[in-house]
Image: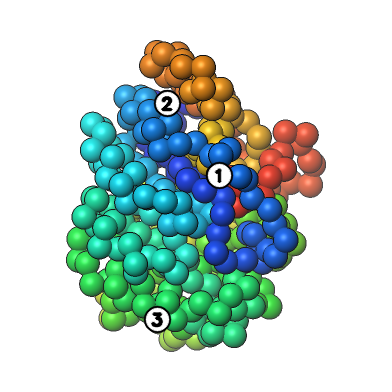
Amino acid sequence: MQDSYERTIDYIRISVTDQCNLRCIYCMPEGCTHRNAKQQLTDEQILKLCRRFAQLGISKVKITGGEPLLRPKVPALIKEIRQIPGIHSVTLTTNGILLGKYLPQLVKAGLTGVNISVDSLDPVHYQQISGRDSLQPVMDSLKAALSYPELVTKLNCVPVYGKNHQDLAELALLAKDEDLHVRFIEMMPIGYGKDFNCCTEDQILKYLEGKLKIRLIPYEGRLGNGPAHYYQAQGFKGKIGFISAVSHKFCSQCNRIRLTCDGYLKTCLQYQTGCDLKPYLQQGASEETLKQVILQTVKEKPVCHHFLEDQKDEKEEKRAMCEIGG
């Protein structure tokens, strides 16, 4: 499936809930509301769309939230998606609190990879960012995930000036003795993220090399589904990765679309551009109709974001990241 700029779209991020058991300051702070479960797509609606996506060329699926493991029966849903012809990988992004409980079921269901969000190894800093004293169960889940050699495990950190920027070296060191990829994700100026200053890739690279006395060398291979690029350091089993949508714009290689938990097909994070697929599902639209609607929506995918430009666009996304899906 290609958009009008000849980019191949083969990866979809599906949010299965906008509920979360953390209250991260840049995503879903205290007081943030979420949708009623009845507004969310059912499992069967998600599976119906996944079959159409697969027929159009989507081969990689990421299950996100909110916290996706708060949705009942996620392992069973992942098992069903994994069995759809054409779907080659199903991965999960989670805050890790419930991961240890569900990990055996998830691996058995065919989960191919898991991304665990950890913004600091300092319990005080972790609580200041996440709003919860939950670091220990998250680290227990990380250890459990690393015990499955068939599961590609990654750690995601969003650096926030004044909150965890001084903790990044400690996080990076987790990749030294474990086959773990530690990735630093630039703060997206969307929703609550607009209130925080972005730590750029170049700043983090300079900090890590100075603090750890290492040289980070660009890794030429490809790891994973999306836009992350990686560096390797001598003596490290894992790699250090960056997702730098703001400072290292990668729109020309964008291969993804997003489905929100209430059925909106979204083609670019910055803009509202997309299509509400839920009415088509509720009206019993045919397979062909659904595919044509999806194809047309993908064709209208914007050429790029304009986060660094001062000029505002009336079509800019108004929803918070937790409403869109991570």
Q: Mark 2 to mark 3: distance in Å?
A: 39 Å
- Give 112 or 168, whichever is nearer the viewer: 112
Q: Mark 1 to mark 2: distance in Å?
A: 33 Å
Residue under numbered circle 1: 37
Q: Is residue 111 above or below residue 197?
A: above
Badge 3 marks a residue whose secondary structure is loop
- The x, y position of residue 193, in whole percent, is 68, 58
Badge 2 marks a residue whose secondary structure is loop
Mark 1 vs mark 2: in front: 1
| Numbered tag placed on residue 173 in the rendering | 3
Q: Upstream in the sequence, badge 1 or badge 2?
A: 2
Look at the image and tell me whether residue 156 can be seen: no
Which quarter of the picture shows residue 216? bottom left
**What amino acid is at disc 1?**
Ala
Q: In the shown orientation, is residue 151 left or right of residue 306?
A: left
Numbered label tally:
3
Residue under numbered circle 2: 2
